[in-house]
Amino acid sequence: MFAKTSLVLLTGPALLVSAFPEIARMVAEKRIQERQTTPQIIEFPEYPGTPNHALFNQFDPALQLVNTSGEHEWRAPGKGDIRGPCAGLNAAANHGYIQRDGVVDAASINTGLWQAFGLDKTATIFLETATAFFNGDPISGRWSIGPHSDKTSSLPPLVGDLLGNETGICAYGHLRSEGDASITRGDWLAPEMNSNCRSYPQYMQELFDLSNQRAGGLITPRVLAEHSNNRKKHSIATNPFYFSPAYAGVAFTFGAHMFAYHLLANHSAEAPRGFLTQDVFMDFFSYKRDASGALTYKYGYERIPDNWYKRHPLDPWTLADIGVSTAQQCAAYPLNCQVGGNTGAVNSFSGVNLGDITGGFINFAEDLNDPKKMGCFIAQAVQADTPSFLSKLLGGAALTAALAAVDSRLGPALQPLKDLGGGCQGVPAGRSMFDYGINFPGATLETEGPRSGQ
């Protein structure tokens, strides 16, 4: 009797956890609580992503100067033109690097974002493909860079196969790609400041204050990583419906913070790896200062500054970099990588058991510090969510056609993430956000309603 008891005690929590699911749940919740209150231990890298970026030292003004004249002159959005939450997409549309009306397709995203920002095609193919399946028309590949547009659908409005609106990437596109706790946008279900399409000066000022404290006024990857952590803490403390799913919450929200540096930083011979001033950031985010020095924002007027130099073509930001930098933020700021949300009251954050939603492939947030596991985790989350999102939009033959395209179109787009993970062999199918989010009021999604998002 005592020998058996001693064996259980000596083998420790692992045996208890495997034998008693309730204990496993309690251990997971305790780890979540501990990580929320634990300060940063591992510093976020000065040069995140794959190691080659820290060593890059080339600058070519002829290759890197971005054209802002002629066909690429800045033009204000006209009547019916759509703008939304992504400063880079808005600026690219205002300069004609993608469609100026804000309804885009694969060709314009893959070409335009490379020409304007040096975003590698591994990243653009993944982003435009996933967005078409989540927020747009999976058949035509068109999607809106803001809220819903009737221009995206390849099906007539009254066709029975079309069950809801193709949402676009903000407003009712909430949690498909865009998530809570963004750089300067609001949480869609927050009590106030709740447009996820527009920017709020308060959040911009918080970013600038942090850059003044940490980097002499420059906006660096480290500043943006800390700002991302601060924004999540703010959402937990102010939004009863805050929710962070695996893809939109862990990967996409932080990916946008890194885009804000790696795609918007200026470059020079003295700073070939880039530098980002507050003035350049304000141009890209459509901000000015009034006579009193306060920040003011104008919706949809984002621009590429004149005499601005993008990333060198030999130093692109790739899909692998997105996966690696997301893993690096998990090491530096574990809270950023918690899947879960508030339960209807502020400061009521409850985490989701990662082992449960990943089939045991990932068990704790620390596992996501490994870029290989992170690559497989993102790919698994996208594949798990896609059928659920499609089934809420399409029915009949259209749904059948869209689901058939998952393997032929979405599969190849996810391959660089799987390559980062060594092929992701043996990784099981994950659970959909609609499944593991069932007990979180912030995970309830609609495709249409009275709010425009602006």
Image (cartoon, rainbow, N blue to C red):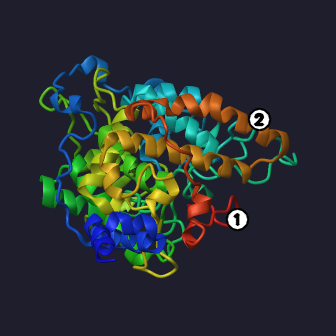
Instruction: Evaluate whether residue 202 shows in this view.
Output: no
Are dots 2 and 1 in contact, CB under 8 Å? no
Quarter of the image for the C terminus: give it: bottom right
Q: The disc labelled 2 sits on which kind of residue?
A: Ala
Task: Point out the frontmost of discs 2 and 1.
Answer: 2
For the residue pair 232 and 453, the one nearer the viewer reads as 232
Q: Is residue 130 left or right of residue 418?
A: right
For the residue pair 144 and 67, the one nearer the viewer reads as 144
For the residue pair 236 and 261, the one nearer the viewer reads as 236
Q: Give above or below for 401 relative to 90.
A: above
Circle 1: element type: loop
Q: Give above or below for 181 relative to 151.
A: below
User: Where's residue 389, x and y in %?
Assistant: 66, 51
Q: Residue at x 37, y 38 (%)?
A: 304
Circle 2: element type: helix
Q: Which residue is mark 2?
A: 401
Q: Is residue 54 left or right of residue 78?
A: left
Q: Residue at x 52, y 79 (%)?
A: 344
User: Where's residue 318, x and y in %?
Assistant: 37, 31
- Disc 2 or 1, which lies upstream in sequence? 2
Distance in Å between CA atoms under marks 2 and 1: 27 Å
Q: Which residue is mark 1?
A: 449
Quarter of the image for the N terminus: give it: bottom left
Instruction: Evaluate whether residue 357 shows in this view.
Output: yes
In the picture as drawn, the residue positioned furthest to the bottom comes out as 345
- Dot 2 surroundings within 10 Å: few (below 14), some, or many (20 or more)? some
Q: Residue at x 32, y 47 (%)?
A: 327
Q: Residue at x 24, y 21 (%)?
A: 61
Q: Is residue 294 left or right of residue 54?
A: right
User: Where's residue 174, x and y in %?
Assistant: 56, 58
Query: Which label number is shown at residue 326?
Result: none
Q: Give above or below for 395 relative to 55.
A: below
